Image (cartoon, rainbow, N blue to C red):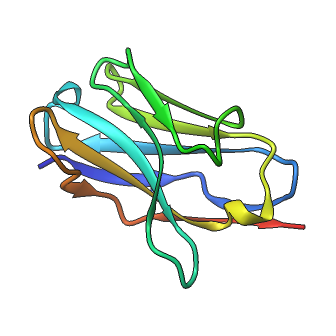
Amino acid sequence: QVQLVESGGGLVQAGGSLRLSCAASGGTFSNYDMGWFRQAPGKEREFVAAISRFGGTTSYAESVKGRFTISRDNAKNTVSLQMNVLKPEDTAVYYCAGRLVGRNKYESWGQGTQVTVSS
């Protein structure tokens, strides 16, 4: 299983931007579809965005479409989430996750990074 470490979280005002990064190690990164999920206090973890193993396909939750962009660099074993026009409701712990090609679920998870958007 690939190991994942997120970075880039922090406190930002509404309307601002943050870029999250996730560094992978211990596996062949291009064998994994990658995703970002988030969990707000008192809520279940939810899907945010995903990108296929070579970056050809991306998908987004409706709530972040047009504001967030997921990307990956297989040469650097990283996946990023550019978050623009942040809203207070984007406040959550953001998790990077990896799904080995051919598997049905994400089995590799990072420890999470806190994003707080103030109004």
Whole-percent x, y for residue 78 in the image? 39, 34
* Residue drawn at x 50%, y 43% as measured from the top left: 21
Whole-percent x, y for residue 119 in the image? 90, 67
Vertically, is 107 above or below 111?
A: above
Q: Is residue 26 left or right of residue 13?
A: left
Vertically, is 12 above or below 93?
A: above
Whole-percent x, y for residue 101 in the image? 14, 32
Vertically, is 30 above or below 112?
A: above
> In terms of image quadrants, where is residue 58?
top left
Q: Is residue 72 left or right of residue 34?
A: right
Vertically, is 17 above or below 44?
A: above
Whole-percent x, y for residue 74 in the image? 32, 22
**Viewer-side residue, 81 vs 75:** 81
**Viewer-side residue, 29 vs 88:** 88
* Residue drawn at x 32%, y 19% as measured from the top left: 75
Q: Across the whole image, how many numbered discs are drawn on residues?
A: 0
* Residue drawn at x 87%, y 49% as measured from the top left: 15
> In terms of image quadrants, where is residue 53?
top left
* Residue drawn at x 21%, y 43% as measured from the top left: 99
Extreme-front residue of the structure: 62
Extreme-bottom residue of the structure: 42
